[in-house]
Amino acid sequence: MKPKIFIDGEHGTTGLQIRALLADRSDIDVISVPVERRKDTAARADALNEADVAILCLPDDAAKESVSLIANDTTRVIDASTAHRTAAGWEYGFAEMDAGQSRRIAEAKRVANPGCWPQGPIATLRPLIAGGLLPADYPVTVNGITGYSGGGRPMIEDYAAKGEDAPEFLPYGLTLKHKHVPELRRYAGLSRDPIMQPAVGNFAQGMITVVPLQLEGLPKVPKGADLHAALADHYAGIDGGVVEVAPYADSERLPDLQPEEYNGTNRMKLYVFANDARAQALLVAVYDNLGKGASGAAVQNLDLMLGLKA
Ligand SMILES: NC(=O)C1=CN([C@@H]2O[C@H](COP(=O)(O)OP(=O)(O)OC[C@H]3O[C@@H](n4cnc5c(N)ncnc54)[C@H](OP(=O)(O)O)[C@@H]3O)[C@@H](O)[C@H]2O)C=CC1
Ligand SMILES: CC(=O)N[C@@H](CCC(=O)OP(=O)(O)O)C(=O)O
């Protein structure tokens, strides 16, 4: 029997993308609730309990409700919302974050799919902190830009309505309460809250995260090449080819360094830039906010959990 998959919230931005990614798969059965019944609790409960894996693409409260509607021991869950990312009993669905994480996801009953913003900074910071090149109490700031699809249907409609009049670059999260701070802190291995300073651009999809580092004053100041070698070593030991570390290069720009570079893929590319004389460095990640940042990661986690294509 093929595993049954139910995407709760299948008509929203993330749900539609996951449906599209699964459309040609003959190794699974996707079960569905008609669009007009998408908020019908009884219909969702039936599908949730019939599914081998339920993928929740819902606002946080609705995702919590979905979990509470599961009345059996067999339905496994991948939650794309923020609701369970630091909750007890949930595995964090970033398979490359350390060598054992893909196995932990494969064995989990409950997987919290990461937020789009934290994945790039976790990908760069975690190996450096774990390897002792940066202290856990380093005062991290994350800058970056994402396409407006990151804001879901309301933001997509708003940008579509404004067209050329929409702002090209709009910083947000200005009250420093971004919802991704707890997961970023936990899974990067930080002992204090990072500053998240995101921006949204007038393009649909794709993102870049940048973590600037002032290294002066650290007990042992790492050179750019040390930071790069630590990342290259970490990802050389991780299966899958999803996260790639670009060669260390002393260049002002790279031709492929644009937010949309990996759209439609599950890939992420990491860069280290540095000025050793100033003891300064930049950790950069490029990926698709709807790919590795959302739907691509969810499908990767689904495959790991079902032992398919893993
Ligand atoms: N967009 C992105 O880049 C990412 C989003 N996420 C997360 O994924 C989740 C979904 O986001 P996104 O796809 O962008 O959101 P959307 O607003 O595009 O889609 C959400 C879907 O859920 C439906 N819905 C809302 N409330 C309920 C409910 N109570 N019961 C059943 N269905 C409901 C909505 O219907 P209706 O439109 O009619 O209200 C819509 O179809 C969120 O938690 C978000 O934080 C995660 C990673 C990235
Ligand atoms: C542009 C925009 O508003 N982006 C969203 C993040 C979307 C995302 O991927 O995060 P979740 O999975 O946690 O929803 C934000 O910054 O809150």
Image (cartoon, rainbow, N blue to C red):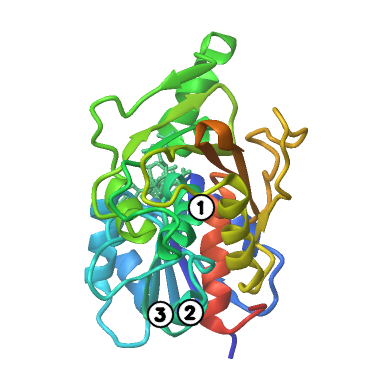
Residue 177 locus on image (x, y percent) = 23, 36
Q: CA distance from mark 1 to mark 2?
A: 17 Å
Residue 151 locus on image (x, y percent) = 43, 35
Q: Residues within 10 Å of mark 1 (few under 14, many from 20)?
A: many
Q: Is residue 98 something that shows in the picture?
A: yes
Residue 250 locus on image (x, y percent) = 72, 36
The quadrant where residue 41 appears = bottom left
Asked if disc 3 and disc 1 are in contact, CB closer than 8 Å, the reply is no
Q: CA distance from mark 2 to mark 3?
A: 30 Å
Q: Amino acid at mark 1?
A: Thr
Asked if disc 2 and disc 3 are in contact, CB closer than 8 Å, the reply is no
Identified at 50% across, 18% down, the residue is 169
Where does label 2 land, which residue? Answer: 100
Q: Amino acid at mark 2?
A: Gly
2 or 3: mark nearer the eye: 2
Tell me the quadrant of the picture where the N terminus can be found: bottom right
Q: Residues within 10 Å of mark 3 (few under 14, many from 20)?
A: some
Q: Is mark 2 within 8 Å of ligand 2?
A: no
Q: Residues within 10 Å of mark 2 (few under 14, many from 20)?
A: few
**Numbered disc 1: secondary structure:** helix
Residue 20 position (above or below residue 176): below
Q: Amino acid at mark 3?
A: Glu
Q: State the residue in front, 222 or 161.
A: 222
First in sequence: mark 3 or mark 1? 3
